[in-house]
Image: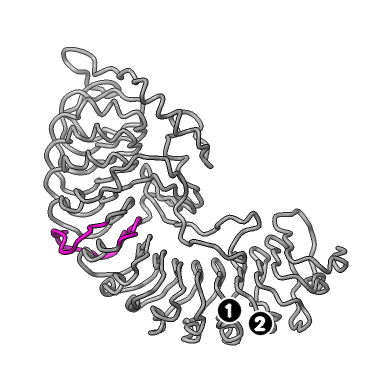
Amino acid sequence: MLFSKLVSLKTLSLVYNDWTGTVEFDTFKGLKNLNMLLLSHLKLSLPRINETFPQLIRLDLVYCNLRKFPEFLRHQKRIESLYLDDNHIGGQIPEWWLNVNKTTLRIFSLSTNSLIGELSPTICKLSSLSMLDLSHNKLRGKLPNCFGRFSKALSSLSLTNNSFSGNIPKFTEGNQLKLIDLSYNLFEGKLSQSLTNCKMLGQLNVERNKLNDVFPYWSGTLPQLIILNLRANQFHEVIRKPRTELHFPKLRIIDISYNNFIGKLPLKYIQSWNAMTCTSVENFGYLTSLSINFSAYLNFMGKPVFYFQTILSIKGMYRQFDEIQNIIALINFSNNKFNGEILEVIGNLKGLYVLDLSKNNLNGSIPSSLRNLARLESLDLSQNELSGQIPSKLAQLFFLQNFNVSYNHPSGSIPQQNQLSAFEGNMGLCGIPLPNLCGNSEALKPPLVEDEHLEESSYLFQFGWKVVVIGYGCGFLAGLFIEKIVIPGNAY
């Protein structure tokens, strides 16, 4: 590689190439003006010490088969963005690195490595940090006491899939946090009410920990909160009426499944979730966790690269999504102990794509107001105590591809829809494809699709989903996420 003659070069990206063999890192040391070096997906040979290498602002060494933290970084005094994700880096984060760039480092990403041990309090010296991603490692122990206040510039914090324990740290006023992901750890105790100081927070994910608390009513005061995930903890008791103002003004995704909530569904909260009533796609886009205006934070095409990420239950499967479109609305209250009737007011949440109330103790009939959820693709009401007839107008839900009402007590004929339906364990139902035929006539035939639905469908698809829907049976919702990992629905 004859890079030595490109003495004026400032940015070099060699990512996603098919080169074989090992690339010597010293190949680039002659590029005296280089400040951004992107070498992801290459097999590299790194120098142990190199004091003469250009002073970089951004360095990407993602998926480079690294096994140690790069020693040459001891002499890098200007780095603002460092990406070392998807390697095999073991041991602890070096103390010397936390001191070298403590006032310049803004993005530090070590996701998906083999880091071990506890986090050193020295990490709190990174006073300019905007994004910290230590997810998918083997880190353990309690977080340093200073963790919730070390950087007022911190916008995105991801510690998912480690073994951190103890209490969630307290967050101070004036912070800039937009994303907090503490999922898949061993945090215990109560959910820190200091999170109300995170006025810009858009996503809070504490899934799969050991938190033991009542529903965090105070989180309803967070004016920017879009995603709230409390799944698989030990939250309990009745979700009582809100004791604060606002009540989640921008909430569009809530998952409180696999907990021990009891009592009736929370009427006052559901009535206040106005963001879920919105069906507009005028400002179509993806939910981002950072507002980026600094060049070192951008990918090579100059676009933001940090998005809200979460695991969602879709059609009985848990999937991790790297990007979520901002028109999605989802409610998952499954695997709790809710009782009483399904609320009619849910029919007002016309932006819903997924509604999962399965595995509770809900009774009464399925409300006919659910026919208003024109965008609904997945409706799971299975394993409850529901009775009465299934509303025939549910067959008019054009995008509904998964309808599960199995193991309840409904009666009468089933609506004839095109979606994949589940009616097991319901002896009182009749109609095709069940063995029990209805007495007087065939079950309801599929309704004609109105022209306005066809027009809406055509309009939505003009945006061009990143995951293309193949065939009607694949479902509309598949195009609304960027999918990464599929997790079995019985993983809990």
The image shows residue 179, relative to residue 404, as above or below, that is below
Q: Which residue is mark 1?
A: 104
State the count of labels.
2
- Residue located 79% across and 58% down the image: 20
Residue 77 numbered tag: 2
Mark 2 crowd level (few <14, some 14–19, many ≥20, 10 Å Cα): some
Residue 288 location (% of width, % of height) = 46, 56
Q: CA distance from mark 2 to mark 1?
A: 8 Å
Q: Which residues are magenta?
A: 223-248
Question: Is residue 306 shown above or below 134?
Answer: above
Residue 315: assigned label: none
Q: Quadrant of the N terminus?
A: bottom right
In the image, is 177 to the left or to the right of 244?
A: right
Q: Is residue 231 magenta?
A: yes
Q: Earlier in the sequence, mark 2 or mark 1?
A: 2
Q: Are marks 2 and 1 in contact (CB under 8 Å)?
A: yes
Q: Amino acid at mark 1?
A: Thr
Does the segment drawn in magenta span residue 107? Answer: no
* Residue 409 x %, y %: 15, 35
The three-letter code of the residue at mark 2 reads: Lys
Quarter of the image where one finds residue 446: top left
Observer-nearest of 266 and 234? 266
